[in-house]
């Protein structure tokens, strides 16, 4: 899922300080699962916006809504349900949702309530960890299913770097050395020899360094 | 000008049994501040962040939660969950540049005991020293 976390309230209050009515729009997709921008978090944010504006001596009308997702045109259309009820939308979706609203609603001001952080999973209740960098050229078949791009602090393709100690990363002792884990995991499958393979210099253009990426499935397009 | 604070207390019905003694008059007799409005809940684990924030929106100058001892909650983890939610609101108050002491968590054993009254007196004293809520428009 896409993992995110709420922006500091001072930043959000600054965004809406000139508004008299805002729509706090939750997303029932990834950000609900990571407890950053679902309906419950939107309700908390709505309350904090009201309180923050009161403290500034201003009144603001805050309404709450939610969409199934904010990353599909069909669901964005449902914003019409709140037509005329807001000066701006404060979206608790990830950055994709905010962009989609901006793309599709020329007349609507939209603000991000979250900082979108990474692609990850729930390691345990209340804790999410980065697992994938979305680099567009997976090497997981070579690394025992563990991603060196997202999970090595240096994104090394030929690790380990030599700085790890007792399986912990030299950049952050709380982080496992993923290359140590790759080594151990490949060993458990008797595939340690894969570690000797030298990965060639990588073309990072698939990782966004070649500009915004686009995926087209001609078998699914309508036009 | 004198300031009479408005304080909202959310307490589990185990920790606040005292409020029912002597037809509900014992607390006042023991000196429990009249500035405190007691909201009894089955378990403080049921108190959501939005509930605590709503109390501030409704005009509370201070809010506190009284739940079971950390290692002795009737519902095992209820008061621990409440403490985490109080901590979340405390952090949010800090983000809004509001005194974090306007919300507190207190863990107390069930039954009749002076600490319940003492916690109320302490909260009343603290909120009086902090003054009116900056959320009053």
Image: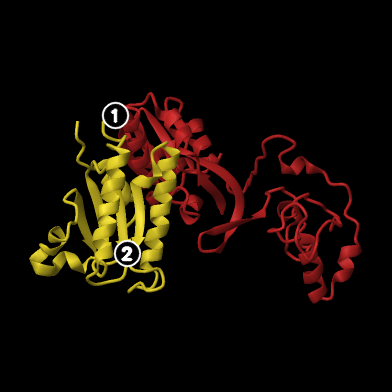
Residue shown at the point (36%, 57%) measured from the top left:
B105
**For the residue labelled by badge 2, is the local secondary structure a helix, a strand or a loop?**
strand
* x and y, in percent, of residue B122 in the image: 29, 52
The colour scheme used to paint the residues is by chain
Q: Say which quarter of the image contains residue A45.
A: top left
Disc 1: which residue: A59
| Relative side of A206 to A198, left or right | left
Chain B on-screen colour: yellow
Q: Residue furthest left?
A: B23
Q: Say which quarter of the image contains residue B65.
A: bottom left
Which numbered dot is residue B67? 2
Chain shown in red: A
Residue shown at the point (29%, 57%) measured from the top left:
B119
Which numbered mark, 2 or 1, is in the foreground of this view?
2
What crowding class fits label 1: few (fewer than 14 Cα within 10 Å), some (14-19), or many (20 or more)? some
* x and y, in percent, of residue B13 in the image: 23, 67
**Residue A100 is at least partly visible in this image:** yes
* x and y, in percent, of residue A107 in the image: 42, 25
Residue shown at the point (38%, 51%) measured from the top left:
A40
Q: Disc 1: which chain?
A: A
What crowding class fits label 2: few (fewer than 14 Cα within 10 Å), some (14-19), or many (20 or more)? many
| Relative side of A56 to A154, left or right | left
Q: Disc 2: which chain?
A: B
Residue shown at the point (39%, 38%) measured from the top left:
B98
Of the pair B76 and B101, the residue shown nearer to us:
B101
**Residue A221 is at least partly visible in this image:** no
* x and y, in percent, of residue A108 in the image: 42, 28
Residue A207, relative to residue B51: is it above or below?
above
């Amino acid at each position: 899922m896409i993992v995110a976390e709420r922006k500091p309230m001072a930043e959000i209050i600054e965004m809406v300080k000139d508004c008299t009515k805002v729509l706090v729009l939750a997303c029932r997709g990834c950000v609900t699962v990571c407890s950053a921008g679902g309906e419950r978090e939107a309700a908390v944010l709505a309350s904090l916006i009201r309180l923050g504006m009161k403290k500034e001596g201003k009144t603001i009308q805050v309404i709450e809504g939610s969409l199934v997702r904010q990353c599909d045109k069909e669901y964005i259309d449902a914003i019409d349900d709140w037509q005329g009820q807001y000066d701006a939308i404060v979206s608790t979706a990830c950055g994709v949702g905010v962009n989609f609203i901006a793309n599709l609603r020329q007349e609507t001001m939209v603000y991000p309530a979250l900082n979108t952080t990474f692609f990850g999973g729930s390691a345990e209740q209340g804790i999410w960890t980065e697992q994938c960098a979305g680099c567009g050229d997976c090497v997981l078949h070579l690394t025992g299913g563990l991603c060196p791009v997202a999970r090595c602090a240096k994104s090394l393709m030929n690790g380990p770097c030599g700085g790890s100690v007792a399986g912990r990363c030299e950049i952050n002792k709380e982080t496992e050395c993923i290359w140590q884990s790759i080594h151990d995991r490949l060993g458990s499958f008797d595939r340690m020899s894969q570690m000797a393979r030298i990965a060639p210099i990588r073309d990072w253009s698939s990782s966004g360094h070649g500009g915004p990426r686009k995926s087209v499935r001609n078998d699914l397009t309508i036009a | 000008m004198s300031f009479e604070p408005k304080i909202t207390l959310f307490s589990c019905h185990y920790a606040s049994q005292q409020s029912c003694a002597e037809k509900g008059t014992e607390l006042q007799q023991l000196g429990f501040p009249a500035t405190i409005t007691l909201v009894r809940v089955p378990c403080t684990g049921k108190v959501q962040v939005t509930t605590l924030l709503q109390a501030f929106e409704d005009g509370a100058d201070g809010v506190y939660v009284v739940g079971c001892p950390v290692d002795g909650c009737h519902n095992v983890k209820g008061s621990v969950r409440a403490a985490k939610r109080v901590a979340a609101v405390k952090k949010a108050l800090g983000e809004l540049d509001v005194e974090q002491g306007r919300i507190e968590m207190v863990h107390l054993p069930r039954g009749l005991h002076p600490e319940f009254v003492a916690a109320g007196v302490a909260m009343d004293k603290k909120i009086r020293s902090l003054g009116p809520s900056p959320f009053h428009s």
